[in-house]
Amino acid sequence: MSFKEAVFNITKEIKKNSIRNDIKKSLVDFRQTNNREMFENFEYVARNQRAQFGGFLAVDDNRHLLNSDNNPFKISALPTDVRKWMEIGHNDILHFNDACVATLGTKFEVCKFALDPYKRFKINFTKKPDLSGLIDNNLIVQASLAFKESKPVKRLLEKHPIGLEKLNPEQMFAAVNFLKNHLIAAGVNKTPDDIAQVIRDNRQTPENNYGKFLLDLVSALSMLEIANQLFYQAVIHETLLVLNEDNIIDVGAESGHFLGKGIEIECQMTSELFFDAVSSVVLVDFEIQNFKRHNFCSIESESISFSQEQGNSAKLKMRFLDDDLNPYFGIYSNSFDP
Amino acid sequence: MLEKRIISENPEGDIWKALLRYSFPTNIEKFMLAKHGVAPSKDLIDSVSGSMTQAEAYFRASKMAPLDISPLLTYYGSINLIAASCSLATNAIPNVKGHGANLTIPATMSKLGDVEIKPNNPTTGGIQIYADTFCTGTNLCTGHNWTLEEILGSIPDLKNEFENCYTSFPFSIPVEIVKMRKKVFERISNEDFSRFSGTLNWNHIKNFKTNYLNPQTMTDHILLNRKLSFTESGFYSISGRKYLEIGHLKGTSLIFAGQVMISLMGLYGLSYLSRYVPEVWTPFVRSDDTGERLLIERFLSVSQRQIPNAVLNLITNSHNKYVYEIDGITDLASVYSESDIKALVDEKVTEVINARNIKL
């Protein structure tokens, strides 16, 4: 079973779960009572953290930083009952992440921060010993095994640098985040030249080996982030957002490069696109003149246009995902093993 | 259908020159061999040739005739022309035994537009047989009436006169086509949309669901983004403006008859009135004080222009645009606004900075 299949098995079960309805209802009720301008709108700020349920907790825990004297927009506290449901969702996602990372073994303890999608947020929440009931433990076990069998993780286990245990976890975290930001900055249609060099170069030099090791970590981290996003979407949306002929205005550039594949699509605005686009996972499903696409993609950037002349539209730049839910699957298509 | 733009200062004259080529037996035979691979029979050649020359004669006469008889002449010219084109298209003489319709004058008639036309002969009636070629798959013989008013409301070039005369909804909506660098979309002005008082059912527009995304309401217009699977299905006025065709609900069937068949039904109705109901037609021609007469005259003029053009399109399998100037299209494909240029520059600079690891 691929990691993608395992994750979607979890999302199917989440949809049937009554806790899901409770979480969703709490958010709907909160939205109605919190109908404020954008920058004072708690939900808008929370969703822009791209941290799923953790985004709500992060904003709540760091309001004092946002509500400085210089800022005229004040964010009020998250109501206790809403916070409770966000913690339930976040707790189970943390369990999922930890189960997946645990399959790497104790040697990779030093990578615990690098592989934590929420490390960069200051969230006052500690994972509870047990699951809250949103995600089934058996399915987490299946997914973690699939995670271990994924291409990035297999390479991590087989090709990690010697002396890994001696590395500094905080430095690992900083390096992985720096690299990830570097890949994102290049855009979805391009691989940075220096990274392409690392991917292409098969020589067993320390620089190449560490470079590839960091790329494997970035891939594994991205897989977890995308899985977390899918669980969150399974709660707040009724169906997965599909970009198809009912909302696509124009298909722009599609490219394949060393990191993977990217695509740019312009589509007509929907409420999901306005609130949740960046980091969302969507299904791209269209056919133009016998050219078909039916792929899951992760939205990396969104540009919204409101124009009286040309109408409202969103331009999305996305990366294709493979069966490991890895947006950087191109790394594993270019064999860098002799 | 391939589009051919033909610049002409005398479109009707040039169209008839092109059509009358098919009044010559040699050309008919050549056409049939090329299209159907078989030589036509002598009867077929004579039928096509005769129909073409008669059609031209009727049309010429109708232009000079007074309104008392011009509908009759235009109608006979049209059915001759359409019969000839059907023969060319099918390599057979149409088995027509009558017009295939009747006309009813309602007891409560208050305007000419109230008269009702009903196609009633699906097997040998001219109207349905010609519809089988011009709007294949469309059944006009549903047992329901078509009012002259709704017929006139279906013809794009009559829009202004129709709106001045009647208060009912038209059966076509003008759109403006806007061409951008990477996409094409269409707009309906609020002024045109407001005619429907918010009751327009988008699903009654031909191929709307398969061609357009959900309409967006803007301040001045309704914006229609085309779907990836868009195929052209509107019809065009003489000036080249596109109109969306609204279907006619007859019972449970939504019928899209197209301009030619709609016009033919309207001409049938007027010719029937002028020939068989002079007690209605004559007072209308002599002393109409509502302005409806202007609409009818315009309808005849448009039919004389449009029907030969549509027939030529069918014969040549191309959309022949005989216009001197085309309106209704705003082409911004080569126009760059300041924000477009800024976005392009920003994109390129960012690409270069990232590619070369330039530290700012």
Image: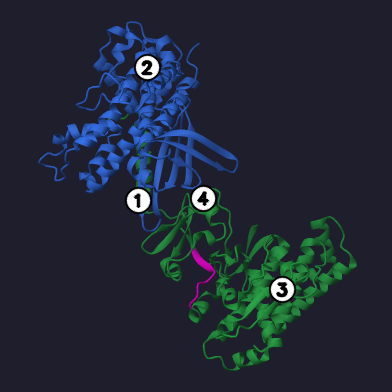
Chain colours: A blue, B green
Note whether residue A56 is visible.
Answer: yes
- Residue B166 lies, in percent from the top left, at 50, 79
Residue B295 in the image: above or below residue B323: below
Relative depth, front residue between A20 and B84:
A20
Give the mark nearest the N terminus, 1 or 3. Answer: 3
Give the mark nearest the N terminus, 4 or 1. Answer: 4
Q: CA distance from mark 1 to mark 2?
A: 39 Å
Judging from the image, what secondary structure is the residue with disc 2 in? helix
Q: CA distance from mark 1 to mark 3?
A: 49 Å
Residues packed near mark 2 inside 10 Å, few (<14), some (14 to 19) or many (20 plus): some
Q: CA distance from mark 4 to mark 3?
A: 38 Å
Q: Residue at x 21, y 25 (%)?
A: A125
Disc 1: which residue: B339
Judging from the image, what secondary structure is the residue with disc 4 in? loop
Can you tell which quarter of the image residue B204 is in?
A: bottom right
- Residue A225 lies, in percent from the top left, at 35, 27
- Numbered label attached to residue B227: 4
